[in-house]
Image: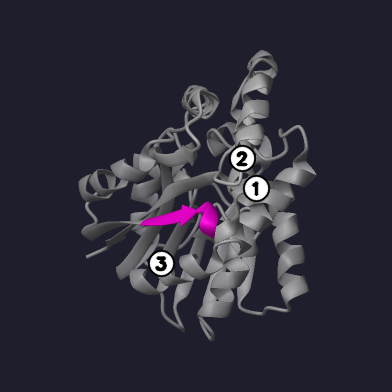
Amino acid sequence: MSTQNLTDAGSYQFGKFKKNAEELERLKLQTTIALKQEQEIWSESGLKPGMKVLDLACGPGFTACELAKAIGDGDVTGVDINEELIATAHQAKESEGLENVSFALGNLYDLNLPENSFDFVYARFVFQHLEKPEVALSNVWKILKPGGVLCILDIDDNWTSFSPESDAFVKFIRKTGAGQKRKGGNRLIGSQLFGLLTKAGYQEVSTTIKPITSEDIGINYFLGVAVLFRVEMLTRLQKLLALPQLRKIKKAAAAPNAWGALGVFATTGTKR
């Protein structure tokens, strides 16, 4: 599949960021900064050694490599719509010296993968960008083995907090959330996942919320990973208008009592 259908990538389109190298570093940081918490989610969701795993919309492959380490003699396939990210994923695999992970171009709206072939499908921060999550859920159902598990990790802006109280922070979150919605995304998807999976026919659906706070990762990393990159959801004019808000947010974050948190929603469902 070629990248000519980037509109299928929804509200996230790597390659169109003003500074793509910085975004790549943010993606790497997003993988490593809270890896312990994410590994706990994998274990609680049923990931086991020996499984055949699909990392859906794998991006630069950093998480797929960590999944490969976690499953031992199993194997991981990572698919993504973006050729540049897949090329980076191959480099990540070589750098890690892993043999049980592979990468390929793939569109989650048209997965060209064998039916009933995966034990575990992982979708990490991708459903927030989808205009048609129901189609993606149906396609994942087809490729899961009977008894296989889909695990979705995503966010909900209603569970994003920052202190000291900041009107600039609230306005920025709302404005970028609206911008993502215009692009086909949904920053409130986390609390909706339970209903979406249930409606799609998945069984044993369960949602847990894992808090990630600035106490875990530091206030600057919290802003960098969870907040400031969202400016890319705005138009050029909106970005200029948002600059005063960004300056106020950064100033507030410099206070010794600054604190931030977001809720990471982990939703699982089984194919029966």
- Circle 1 packing at 10 Å, graded few (<14), some (14-19), many (20+), is some
Q: Earlier in the sequence, mark 2 or mark 3?
A: 3
Residue 235 makes an appearance in the image: yes
Looking at the rendered structure, the kind of residue marked 1 is Asn
Which residue in the protein does label 3 denote? Answer: 41
Q: Pointer 1: what residue?
A: 220
Residue at 48% across, 71% down: 39
Q: Are marks 1 and 2 in contact (CB under 8 Å)?
A: yes
Tag 3: Cα neighbours inside 10 Å, few (<14), some, or many (≥20)?
Answer: some
Q: Is residue 218 left or right of residue 97?
A: left
Give whichever of discs 1 and 2 has the lower sequence position. Answer: 1
> Looking at the image, is mark 1 or mark 3 nearer the viewer?
1
Q: Which of marks 1 and 3 is nearer the N terminus?
A: 3
Labels 1, 2: front one: 2
Q: In this view, does 241 lie to the left or right of 45?
A: right
Q: Position of residue 218 (x, y in %)?
A: 60, 54
Question: Where 238 falls versus 70 (above or below)?
Answer: above
The Cα–Cα distance between marks 1 and 3, rounded to whole angstroms, is 24 Å
Please give the name of the residue rendered at 59% of the width and 34% of the height, measured from the top-left corner. 230
